[in-house]
Image (spheres, rainbow, N blue to C red):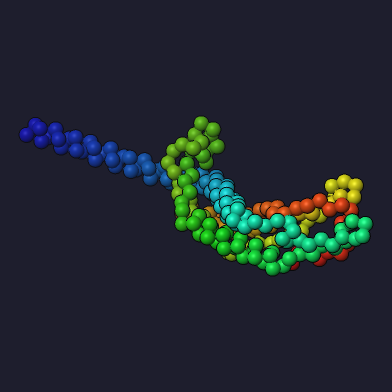
Amino acid sequence: MQRRRHRTKCDNSNSYLVVMLVIGMVVVLIFINSALKPVIMNMAESYGKMSVAKTVDDAVSKVFENEDIGYSDIVRLTFSDSGFVTAVEYNSAEINKIKLLLSRSLVSSLEKLRASKIKVPIGSVTGNAYLSGRGLNLRLRIMQSSVPVIEVISSFESEGINTVLHRIIIRITVETEAYLPPRRVSFTLTQDFVIAQTIIVGDIPSGYADIG
């Protein structure tokens, strides 16, 4: 009888500890949901932007690793008899091909990001350097709000006397949401990638049509 009573007391003690742990976790979650909610959502946006930026960067790098694209594939320069550039023309077929490849790569990569979960340590939202990266992990989901917008931009910059730096820039804009139940935060990320450039001798050519 004494052994049974002893076991019953141990079982009751264990049950009590489990209940207290559950209550403690609920209290922590309530505290996080109320007091730290604005801080957590700011952190969710920061983590979301970092994840999307890396995903976009990897998707763009993947395209240009597989495609050998140079300045002359995109741009055709016309020179005067004295050797100065008088006109700049763009290869629209090649530009459209690049945009299509980028679009496919971006959509595929962002879908994989959407299917994954990002871990945000609770300690990181406190702002305390010692607690950063510690504690329970909050599960963050990134969802793409719309199709990525891809722009091709032509940029001319003076580099000195009679020299102009001409760049072809890919500008990618992604609208996404960071979802941390039960809240969401929307943000827009824009990144520029220089895909080709050259130095032009002379002033900015007067005879050129801007891309798009």
Judging depth in this view, the residue of 93 and 4 nearest the camera is: 93
Judging depth in this view, the residue of 155 and 177 nearest the camera is: 155
Q: Where is residue 179 in the image (x, y as percent from the top left)?
A: 50, 55
Q: Residue at x 57, y 59 (%)?
A: 106
Q: Is residue 11 visible?
A: yes
Q: Position of residue 141 (x, y in %)?
A: 48, 54
Judging depth in this view, the residue of 160 and 81 nearest the camera is: 81
**Quadrant of the drawing holding the C terminus:** bottom right
State the residue lying farthest toward the front.
81
Q: Is residue 184 visible?
A: no
**Quadrant of the drawing holding the N terminus:** top left
Viewed as shown, does residue 71 lie left or right of 77? Answer: left
State the residue lying farthest toward the bottom.
93
Q: Residue at x 76, y 61 (%)?
A: 75
State the residue lying farthest toward the left.
1
Q: Where is residue 157 in the image (x, y as percent from the top left)?
A: 82, 51
Judging depth in this view, the residue of 208 and 147 nearest the camera is: 208
* Quadrant hosting residue 102: bottom right
Q: Relative to 130, does residue 53 appear above or below in the rendering?
A: below
